[in-house]
Image (cartoon, helix red, strand yellow):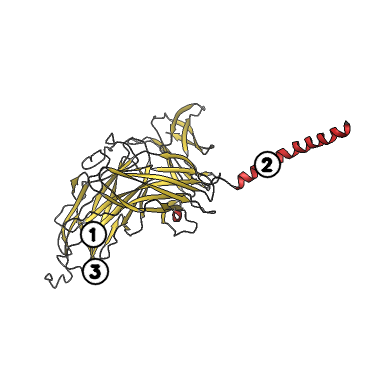
Amino acid sequence: MPSKTPDYQKRTRIALCLPLLVFSFLSLGRGQTTGTGVSPSQPGRLPDNRPMLSLSPAVVMTRGSFGQSVTQTLSLSNETPNPLAFQMVAEDVIVRDGARVFVPAGEMAQSIAASAVFSQKSGVVKPSSAVSIEVRLTIPVQTNIRAVVVIFRGTNAIRQPQSAVALTASLGTLITFNLTNDARLEAEPARVNASSASSNLTVSEWLRNSGADPVIPEGVAAFLNSSGKLVAKISFSLPQRLLPGERLEFDAECPNELPAGTYKVLCSFQYEGRDMTNATTFDVP
Amino acid sequence: MKWSIRPSGAAAVAIALLLPAAARAQKQITKKAPPSSLMLLTQEETPVSLTVVSLPDGAPLLGSQGGWTLDLGRVSYAGIPATPNVAIERSSGSFVVSTEFGLMIRDPRQHPRTVSLLVFLEPVQSRVAIRIDGVTLQAAPQLLAAHIPTRVVTRHRLEIEIPASLAEDEKLVVNGIELSVVPD
C-alpha cells in the first residue's frame, strides 16, 4: 500500500494513458476515400484517408404496412490490421421533445427493434475481410415507431499494458419505415439573418414533421425584389430526414450581396410529392 | 325464339353484372392479404468516416492509423498534471481528470449529410465515472450529438471522475469507450 500523508489521506496516484483506439477510419458505406475533406479549421494532423471499417448500406428506407417484415443484408468490411469482434444490436429510434432518442429493443411497447432476428448474433471480422449479416424486422400490427438502427457493436476493446481507456468504434445502419400516407410538415415563420463582414445573408426556417411517417424535405428559397423580380434562388443546405415529431432548422445562405431595398423571400419545401411554401419580407439597409 | 333468347340475354346481363362484382371481390381479397414484405425504397451507400483529432488545447494525441492514444500522463489527487492541457478538479471525495479532443465526421464523396453519434461503455466501469460532454457513459448507447455535419471538427470534453479512495499507485484500467456513428 502506498504511503499517505495526513494532508492527503486519500491521496491517489494513478497513471492514465488513454489510447483512443478509433479504427481511425470508421466508414459507413462502401467505397474508397478519395479526398481529405478536411475543413480549414481542422486542428491537428490529417488522418489517413484509407477507410478501415465500413458498413453497407448506411441507410435503408422502406415502405409498407403494419404486420409486414423486411429482411436486409448488412455487410461489415474490416480493412484494419486487427480483428474486430462484434455483437449485433437493434434499437428503436424515436423522437422526444423534437429530438431523436435511441431506445434499447423491447423497452418500448410496440418495439420494432425487439422483433430483430439476426442470422448471426455476434462474430469476428478478420483483417482484410468482410462479413454479411441478415436482419429480419417485423412491424407490429400497431406502432408509432418509424425507425430502427442496427449496430455492429464492437466488443474487442484494446487493452494496453499500462492503465488505459480504449475508445472503439462501431457502426450503425438506419432503417426507416413509411407505413401510412400521413406525411405532414409544419413550418415556423422564416427568419432572415442579415449579412455581415464575415457572413452572408441567411434564411432559416424550423420544420417539424407533424405526420406519422418519415419525410426528407428539400427546399428552395427565392428572393424577389420590391418589383417582384427574382434576384436570387438558393437551395436549403442539407436535405435532412425528419422522423415523426422531429424538429429541425433548415438554412439557406445567399451568396449574392443584395442591394439596399425591400425583399420578399419565398421558402418552398417539397416532400412526399407535396409542396409547402411560405414567405417573409425583409429590408437590406 | 323469343323464349329461348330471353334466358340467354338474362344470363348475359347477369354475367355482365357479376363479373365486376367478382373482380371487386378479388381486389378485396388482395387487400386483405397484403404482401408480407415491406417494399425497399432506397439504400444509401454514401460512406461516412470518423476520426479522432488532436486539439491545440487538448492532450497530445499519439499513434497513427488504426490506433490513437490520448496520453493524460500520471495524475494524482494532490499533484499537478505533468501533461499539458490536462486539468484536475478536486472535490472532497473525488477528483476529475479532463481534457479536450476533437472528432471529425467526414464524407469522402463530399456528399453533404449529417450523422448522429452514440456513445456507450463496454464493459461498464464500476470504480470511475466517465463522461463525454457531460454525458455519463453507460452500457446502453446514449446520444452524444445529433445532426453533426460532415467535414467539421467537433470539440468534445472527456472527464474521468476518480474516487479519492482509490489506492495510490493503483493502475486504472478503463476499457471500452465506444462511439457509434449512425447516419441521420
Which callout, 1 or 3, points to the residue nearer the camera?
1
In-front residue for pair A78/A33: A78
Q: Dot 2 corresponds to which residue?
A: B24
Within 10 Å of the Cα at label 3, are there few (<14), some (14-19), or many (20+) other Cα atoms? Answer: few
On the question of residue A26 being in view, the answer is no
Q: As shown in the figure, which amino acid type bears the numbered disc 2?
A: Arg
Tell me which chain the residue with mark 1 is part of.
B
Q: Secondary structure at mark 3?
A: loop
Q: Dot 3 corresponds to which residue?
A: B93
On the question of residue A10 being in view, the answer is yes
Tell me which chain the residue with mark 3 is part of.
B
Tell me which chain the residue with mark 2 is part of.
B
Residue at the far bottom in the pictured view: A6
Q: Is residue A71 left or right of residue B159?
A: right
A31, above or below B38, in the image: above
Residue found at x 23% / y 42%: A43
Residue found at x 21% / y 52%: A19
Which callout, 3 or 2, points to the residue nearer the camera?
2
Q: As shown in the figure, which amino acid type bears the numbered disc 1?
A: Val
Q: Position of residue A53 (x, y in %)?
A: 29, 44
Q: Secondary structure at mark 2?
A: helix
Q: Dot 1 corresponds to which residue?
A: B174
Within 10 Å of the Cα at label 1, are there few (<14), some (14-19), or many (20+) other Cα atoms? Answer: many
In-front residue for pair A120/A275: A120
Q: Give the mark nearest the N terminus, 1 or 2.
A: 2
Q: Secondary structure at mark 1?
A: strand
Q: Position of residue A255 (x, y in %)?
A: 38, 31
State how far apart marks 3 and 2 are (Cα). Answer: 76 Å
User: In which quarter of the view is residue A91 placed?
Assistant: bottom left
